[in-house]
Amino acid sequence: MLVQWLQTYEIDDALLARIIAAALQSFPDAEVYLTWDNDLVVVACRSRCPGADAGRLHATAALAREAARVGLDSDAALQLRRIGGRGLLQTYARALHAEPHSDFHPVVALQGPRTRFRSDRADTLQRLTDNGLPVLDVLEGRTPPPSSDTVAALPGHSLLLGRRRAIALASALRDRSHASTLALRDRDAPQAELALQALLGLSHGTVQDPATWAEAASTVAMATIGHLPATDLQGAWIGPGWIDASLQSEPVRRMLAMYAAAAARDAAAMRSSGEALLQLPQALPVEVQEQALVIAQLGALRLGRPGEVEQLHAGYGVALPHSPQLRMVRHMIRIRALELRAQSPVATATQGVEPPR
């Protein structure tokens, strides 16, 4: 077993993908974990990697104390940090057209100083975990730990802080009385809390300003849906009690249906509701349209219809700007779809699909 730390700062995705490709070339199985913002750990195994078991960290009192200090004292804490296995890492390498790094072609060593000088960051793997949508649920078949599982929210770890924020926001959606006491605990991301206040204020009766409502709803949705399982989103996005959908205009109803589908991980509803929103004649905010595209594509993947991913891209995605949060997520989804369609070597599977600039 190889356990290797990799930084994602002062390096770019192209170089990191070469390192990952080299590990996959030498080991039959591998997994990657997000240990901290900007830090990954790759576990590579000669046979199938064993499942993570926090109980092993309690072998001695000293080790248990150290594991608790860094927030690794439960299976949920390990599960939350796991980004994906060999299949996801292969998709990542293919998405970057990465040839395995080797001593005969030491590209990382030669180009590393340039990425360090530019202060580059390879953030694609982390964006797969904290983009706000159920991307890994589809690509990896994972389910986020429920809110009932205790996971320490450590300062400086945006994924853990995002989960804590999602739990508080979902609770406030279920019970408006919680919204007034929702603290802006994370200095770096009060936007979701402020959007929640705006969303609830705009959702009494019939929404009078759908554009402003859509911006607030999209912000809160992206701060909750991807971090929590369906059970924790009941009453928030699934059967929401904070808004009467029957009173709303068509754009608002379609947005609510799309977020309910994504929250429930309902593939058929994700596929249909995402495209239904993209077909609206009214111009919704660009961020909402991008979410709709990704949700529809994820639904198509889970339904076993990868060809529709590229159809959706051609029909809607080409005209949609790439946000920093979803830029490489969209590319990875397209590559996974091509892999499923072609089931062929790298050169064929990724032909004609270049990473977005």
Image (cartoon, helix red, strand yellow):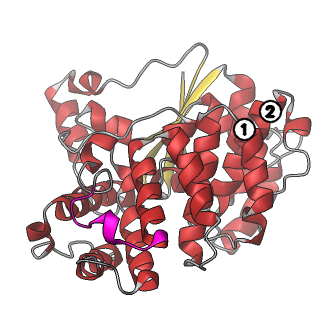
Q: Closer to the N terminus: mark 2 or mark 1? A: 1
**Point 23% across, 53% down: residue:** 235
- Between residue 348 and residue 35, name the one nearer to us: 348
Along the viewing direction, whichever of 129 and 298 lies nearer the viewer: 298
Q: Is residue 9 visible?
A: no
**What amino acid type should be assigned to the residue bearing mark 1?**
Pro
- Disc 2 element: helix
> What is the count of numbered marks?
2
Density class for disc 1 (Cα within 10 Å; few <14, some 14-19, many ≥20) is many
Residue 355, numbered circle: none
Label 1, on which residue? 306
**Is 234 positioned to the left or the right of 148 in the image?**
right
The residue beneath circle 2 is 341
Residue drawn 59% across and 76% down? 286
Residue drawn at (18%, 24%) of the image: 60
Q: Residue furthest front?
A: 246
Q: Identify the residue at horizontal 45%, vertical 49% (top origin).
A: 262
x and y percentages locating residue 166 in the rendered image: 29, 58
Query: What amino acid type is highlighted by mark number 2?
Result: Arg
Residue 287 as seen in the image, left or right of residue 238:
right
